[in-house]
Amino acid sequence: MRILHISTRLILGGSQENTVLSCEGQARRGHEVHLAFGPIYGPEGSLLERVRSFRTPDGRAITTHVVPHLIREVSPIADLRCYRELRALLARLKPDVVHTHSSKAGILGRAAAWNEGTAGRLWAVLHTIHGPPFMPVEGGPLHQAKVRLNNLRYTHAERFAARRCHTIISVADAMTREFLRRGIGRPEQYTTVNSGMETEAFLTPAPGESRAEVRARLSLRENDFVIGTVARLAQHKGHDDLLDALGDDLKKHPDWRLLWVGDGWWRDRLLARVNDLGLTGQVITTGLVPPSGQGGVPGLIRAMDVLAHPSYREGLPRTVPQALLCSVCPVAYDVDGTGEVCRDMLTGRLVPAGDRAALRQAIVWLAEHPRERQEMALRGREDCRHRFSAQTMVDELEKVYARALELSKTCH
């Protein structure tokens, strides 16, 4: 098959890693794989080098295409140009499968694929929901009104796009429920395929990446209690909530540490707040790190005692199963699909979104109950071992593509 994936930005992030692993797995199976994306910029890092250096044993590569006007922000002029650029790309490639990822690429990509398919060769059109485009309604009245208006716009745009694809893939059942609740698509369009990852890197430490070795590099002592996050330093990822919840406890426990893995637009503001709180010596930031390998995410998670993920918007956060694969217990906000992996008192601690008191209580409880913390992590490790492997994801996508190709013969 000739498969075209379309994603808004190829930055370091969960949906992008999912997309790249899908491309790599499909190329290894002999498919001709193309990946289109918009310009890459900002402090979040990029997966472009990995994609361009990928080769299968028989020499297959992933062909990349930069779409100049595929940008995250809503811009009528740029969006129209992007739509035309995507149609031109589709007319040239004539793929068997068009698979879109992320909201902007999903809306414009599905419209272009459906209309170009109608005009010429037919192909299967699929979209993956990695996370909801709808923002939490919070803040003052004016901000709430703005958020509600934007959410309404996205709802109508997603309804439009759902009518222009054969299959919608959710990374969590919660995504399907939320989109159907908003009248987006038909129940029979949806299927769930959990987001795959390179599980072996988390299950087995690479040389030099054991817990003790990574902690030594970070100047962490054996008895330090490390609460870590793996997330962009950005809005709605919950770093402020951790400071609000644990500021007093960090001062009371000099052996407690926050380990922030990642970078983002909020870095300077967050670190200024850390300084104002007098916690500079207890917050460690790594900046951008590779998803795997020396100095990568698996080793840093392994150095933690608890993985904290107080994010307000998620599909199914990859960092939660990654922590469990590393035998590290997560504590997370109960949003979207998070509870499908982090089950309270079974495979972690799950607390209501925005409840900083509950977040603090859960982390303190985990600090005081190391045996129960380890038991929950090991229980989750076994649950995630097969469920979240990249191999499992690619296997499932093959089945979904086959069904979508059959549908494309009758639905277009």
Image: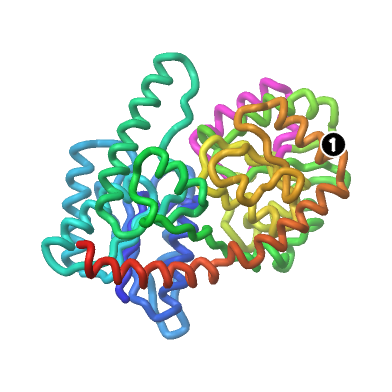
Asked if the magenta segment contains residue 178, the reply would be no
Residue 196 placement (x, y as % from top left): 54, 62
Residue 42 occupies quadrant: top left
Residue sitting at 75 percent across and 34 percent down?
A: 282
Residue 235 placement (x, y as % from top left): 51, 32
* Numbered range of the magenta stretch: 258-283
Instruction: Look at the picture and state if 35 lies above or below 267.
Output: below
> What scheme was used to colour the molecule?
rainbow
Residue sitting at 18 percent across and 44 percent down?
A: 80
Asked if the magenta segment contains residue 273, the reply would be yes
Residue sitting at 76 percent across and 45 percent down?
A: 345
Residue 223 occupies quadrant: top right
Amino acid carrying mark 1 in the image: Asp
User: What SS does tag 1 mark?
Assistant: loop
Disc 1 marks which residue?
Answer: 255
Horizontal side, residue 375 vs residue 181: left or right: right
- Please say whether residue 217 is visible from this viewpoint: no
Residue sitting at 27 percent across and 54 percent down?
A: 110
* The N terminus: image quadrant: bottom left
Horizontal side, residue 138 vs residue 146: left or right: right
Horizontal side, residue 108 vs residue 322: left or right: left
